[in-house]
Amino acid sequence: MYRQEQIRMSTPESLYREKMQELQKQLNSVMQSINNNSKVVSFMNSPVGQYLDEHPYISLSLLIFVALSAIPVGLFLSLVAGTAIAACLGVIVLEGVIIIVGGLMLLCVLCGIIVLSFGISGVLSVCYIAVSSILNYLHTSRLSAKYSEPSKVLEPGDVSASKPSKNFSDED
């Protein structure tokens, strides 16, 4: 007899019943925890909660709409987030490229300015030496012409003749 009860208890229908009862108990405990939640209680006491409680068809339609729209909304938000991240990375990369190109252009301009400054400095140095030499030559030729005149009479107020002459070509 014990064996027959075991066979009867192990039939698929009895296993199905036991599983359904366990599932129902778990579902009831989940529903109790949801209904006892303070946020759910405050929502159900609000006018919207009372309206949805009185109109189950609208509640079910709203629940189905929210459930079905979760995937498209999630995909859209993922697209927006991905686009924003790509745009930020693109801006960072673009900014980096612009900074590198600008830095290279600045380097080229500065190298050109260095070459130009050496050239201008060289030209100015040559001009200074040339003008200095010309002025020195003119000054020494004027002095030599002045002292080579034998008939010049010195006047009492002439101080330049009493000074010894300098050779200005030795200064450079």
Image: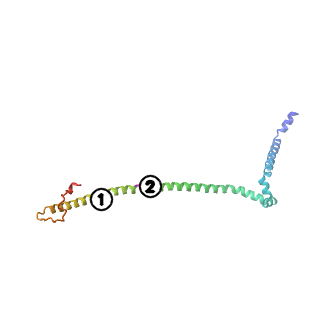
In this view, the residue farthest toward the top is: 2
| Magenta residue span | 100-107
Image position, residue 154 (x, y; %): 14, 64
Q: Is residue 104 magenta?
A: yes
Q: How is the image coloured?
A: rainbow
x, y percentage for residue 71? 67, 55
Tell me if mark 2 has few (under 14), some (14-19) or many (20+) residues whose alpha carbon lies within 10 angstroms of its own.
few
Residue lying furthest left in this view?
A: 151
Could you say where residue 143 lies in the image, as x and y percent from the top left?
18, 61
Helix, strand or loop at label 1? It is helix
Q: CA distance from mark 2 to mark 1?
A: 31 Å
Indicate left or right for 132 with 147 as reference: right
Who is closer to the viewer here, 60 or 108?
108
Amino acid type at circle 1 is Leu
Q: Is residue 133 above or below residue 4?
A: below
Mark seen at residue 103: 2
* Quarter of the figure with the C terminus: bottom left
Q: Is residue 34 left or right of residue 146?
A: right
Q: Dividing the picture into quarters, in which one does residue 65 lie?
A: bottom right
State yes or no: discs 2 and 1 in contact (Cβ < 8 Å): no
Asked whether 54 falls inside the magenta stretch, the response is: no
Front-lying residue, 120 or 150: 150
For label 1, the residue is: 124
**Horizontally, is 136 left or right of 70 in the view?**
left
Determine crowd level at label 1: few under 14, some 14-19, many 20+ residues with C-alpha closer than 10 A. few
